[in-house]
Image (cartoon, coloured by chain):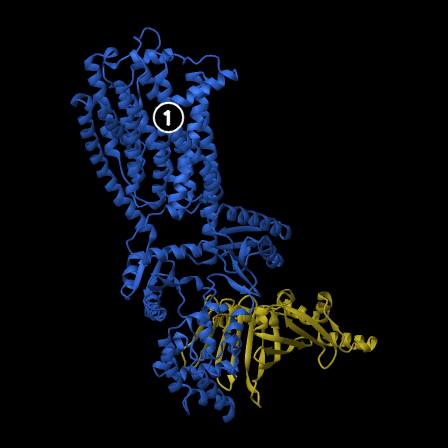
Amino acid sequence: MRFRLSFAAVLALLAVFAFWVWPRMRVETNLLALLPSTTENRVQLEAVKKVADRSSRELVFIVGTAAPGKLRDTGLAFADALRASGAFARVDYVVDDRYIAAARADRDLRTGLLSSRDRDLLASGRVATLERDALRAAYTPLGFTRPFGIADDPLGLASSAFAEELPGTGRARLEGDILVAREAANGDAGATAGARAWTIVRAATAGDPYRTETHHDVMAAIDAARAAAARVAPDADIAGSGVILHAAAAASKAQTEVAIFGGFDLLAVVLLIVLVFRQVRPLIVTLLTIGIATCSAIAMCHFVFGEVHILTLTFGTSLIGVSVDYAMHYFVNRMPSSDGEPETHPHDIAPALILGCTTTVAGYLTFLIAPIPGLRQIALFSATGLATACAVVILLYPRALDLLSVGFRRLKLERSTTPRAVPRWVARLSRRRLENALPRAGIWALVLVMAGLGAAGLVRLESRDDVRSLQRPPPELVAAERKVRTLLGIGFDTRFVLVTAPTPDDVLRRLEDLDPVLRRLVEAKRIKGALSVSPSLVSLERQRADRALLAREVYAPGAALERVMVRLGFDADAVAARRAAFTAADRKFLTPEHWLESPLSAPVRHLWLGALGKDHAAVVLLDGNVAPDEVRTAVEAVPGVTYVDQVADISHVLGEYRRIASWLMLVVVTVMLACLLVFYRSGAAVRTAIPAAAGLALTLATLGWMHEPVNLFHVLSLLLVLGLGVDYAIILREGRNQQAVLAVFLSMTTTLISFGLLGFSSVPFVRSIGITVAFGVAYTFLIALAARPRTH
Amino acid sequence: MRAGLLVALLLAAASAPAADSAPVTNAAQLARLTRDTAKSLSGARAVRGRFVQRRQLAGLAKPLESSGDFLFARDVGIEWHTAQPFDSQFVLTHDAITQRDEGGEPLHISAADQPALTVVSRVFFALFALDFDALSQDFTMAGVDGGKEPWRLELKPKTAALGSVFRQATIAGDATVKTVTLNDANGDSTVIELRDVKYDAKGLTPDERRRF
């Protein structure tokens, strides 16, 4: 009955996995999903997410060639190939007249807009300067730089407001209709022959930047575009910058790692089983168990998180090595002892398996304490997989093996059902004891030496809580990004300024309050510049104030407009017409809705976050932020303004949780000892706990000797080692002598292989966990073996 | 030099009277058309001369007239010194515009802040240097042989970006560039007459260099 129910449950699980989870499964590759929620402030969190989502789609390419006449066509070939691929929602290369056309179309809405210089001049009564500029523009080539004609905009107010709102292009210059940046000539300012010129192509991906399909499309499109550019100019050189390039690189690396680690793991498990058991049934049954455990783990993540993170899968390969333990314990327990050992009957190992599974699952569940979504998924994945494997072994194995054995005999796959005896070398190892091999003094000496080495290692231990422990971008991407940044002369980083307020207009007002602060920071050379929706979008309050100023200083009878127009020779009708146009536009204001629809908002549209919970928000990006603390103090003096530094916040959170986890480790050791004291007599309890505790200390000492700075992930892995280590000690104590040694040896070997492989991961935190667990289980095994109880 | 050109043109006119205003658009033909100007220009490090600018604004009966002298320095910039109706110095380099006049604070506009500025400065440089490579990137050119001037080039912007500034530009001259006409997108048109143009192979004097 129990068997049938369990079997039905397994079938149901597999059916759900195959027909429900698998077709809907979404593999998340966003490394940001790993990042901790650094703040209790939900608005800020939402803002960070929104900014990241938007900017993750953006890509900047520089296309360079030394062939002077071919630059435009090379860029065009590149841009056209990107466009033709369909992988991009937007590809910008050739600069057209859309901005000025939009500004001309909105002429009436823009009558009230002023540049900051003109506003200052008008407000401070220096209107004469404006008038003089207007005359200069009429008589000198200066007039050609004004996008609005003199008859339409006699004082040039609309022209300068328009010029101010377009973001600068850094070191790039508009040449014809493309943006061109030239490498800074070494030494002499004169143009050096053969110097490479670069043009700029911007693009935004069409698909979700964190979907693997998008990565394939985008990377294929970039490769094709590179080839297209090379056909025009064989020396074409292209460098790109964008979050999606990082995501694609990380995802493809993670996929390779899943395949390699998983493959090696399975191979190792198969080899071990074949070598030790020399039977087909254990192999098949064990592989099936691993399969069922993996399916249930993936299904659990799918239902709880709605997706499975690619790094969970990378880490999940370790499930192969860990979940195989229970099956191996089961088979080892059925093995007869090898020569000479008094035969004992296989006993019910369910209690030992449950106890062991509980301690390991508890080890994984400690990962949940850190508010890092990626780590939580890993914990849930592993805990579910292990619990499933354990349940399968306890509930299904005896009957399933009997049934299989009948079938196998019929198919002549298996000659005998009698399990093979425990290999001789294990039997020998199990008889050998440290106490017999070494005199008591020798043992103490060994312990002292180990303690000394351990202490020396622990002294060397240092910690580093750095976001780099979460991800480390490939150097070639970093180099390409630096190249783009240097060439464009613009360097926005991950730190930004968040402005929130109850209404959109309040956000704009606060942005306008922030503007002078930012200008002062630029003048003081604390930042190089800032990118903001202000002054492209202006608050209603400011629009009203500017109109009042214009009405008084410019459009009033006998004021600046009339004086300039009369000087230039316009008649009274022309002056009246301009005045009428101003009055007619009186109730027309530039609104966020209209602005968002206009091409003019394109360069900064992504900085307008819109509604964010109950509030509205916008962000300001900082260019060349060299004095973060000073900048933070300055901008946060404006109400509703927060300086957001994700990287510092994350490092801070990592540090905080490392300390919490370290304390937790002490608590766990204490609690574990208490539990064992209840289960066993005091001496045995200590003997069961010592290997794990000493293993932890030695692992930390090894990290110290390796000069590997300890972070949260090492500490959490130690908690996992604790769970596994206690497992070993329990089995050594509970199991029959030879069989216990073999079971623990197999368990340690598979775990060592799984986590040892993770130690080669390119993802820093996966690597941290890998090496810590690998060293931890090895030490714990050796100590547990040496310290196992004398008799049983 | 000038005599040689005249002779050549007379001969050309005599042999092909029908070629009065047949436009040529081929680059090689264009180069041949203006070769004497181009030849004298190509050797020059600096060009000096006087100008009269007449700007016809939409809605004004009388053009706004200004005059002064100019200095074109290859690879450096253009200095446009207006003497009438007021004294004002306009200096255009690849990276910035600076305007100074007596009594007022100088106006400095950097190309990094105003990308459109580089479009204007590039056109000015190319017009003065008769740099066909640069001009042909931005304009489709049609040359007209004969007529009132020995040669005339009509330039129409190729790109929308430039089209939003200039609708058409015309350059005419003999051995030197004589007039430049710019029709801007706003309906205003500007005719610049260049007089006493002198080419100098030596380049700028130290005094002149300081002005940039």
Give the residue at x 28% y 54%. A40
Horizontal and vertical percent for residue A405? 45, 18
Residue furthest to the left = A682
Q: Which of A746 and B27 is in front in this view?
A: A746
Give the residue at x 48% y 12%. A415
Residue wearing tag 1:
A393
Give the residue at x 40% y 43%. A303
Q: Which amino acid, by three-letter code, is at mark 1?
A: Val
Q: In this view, does A169 lie to the left or right of A333?
A: right
Quarter occupied by the N terminus of chain A: top left
Which chain is rendered yellow in the image? B
Whether residue A697 is situated above or below residue B163 in the rendered picture: above
Whether residue A550 is situated above or below residue A765 in the rendered picture: below
Horizontal and vertical percent for residue A357? 31, 29
Residue furthest to the bottom = A572
Horizontal and vertical percent for residue B67? 55, 84
Whether residue A514 is situated above or below residue A107 in the rendered picture: above
Residue A184 in sight from this viewpoint? yes
Residue A325 in sight from this viewpoint? no
Neighbour class for label 1 at 10 Å: few (<14), some, many (≥20)? Answer: many
Hue used for the chain lettered A: blue
Please state the chain letter of the residue tagged with numbered disc 1 in the rendered image. Answer: A
Q: Tag 1, which secondary structure?
A: helix
Horizontal and vertical percent for residue A678? 17, 27
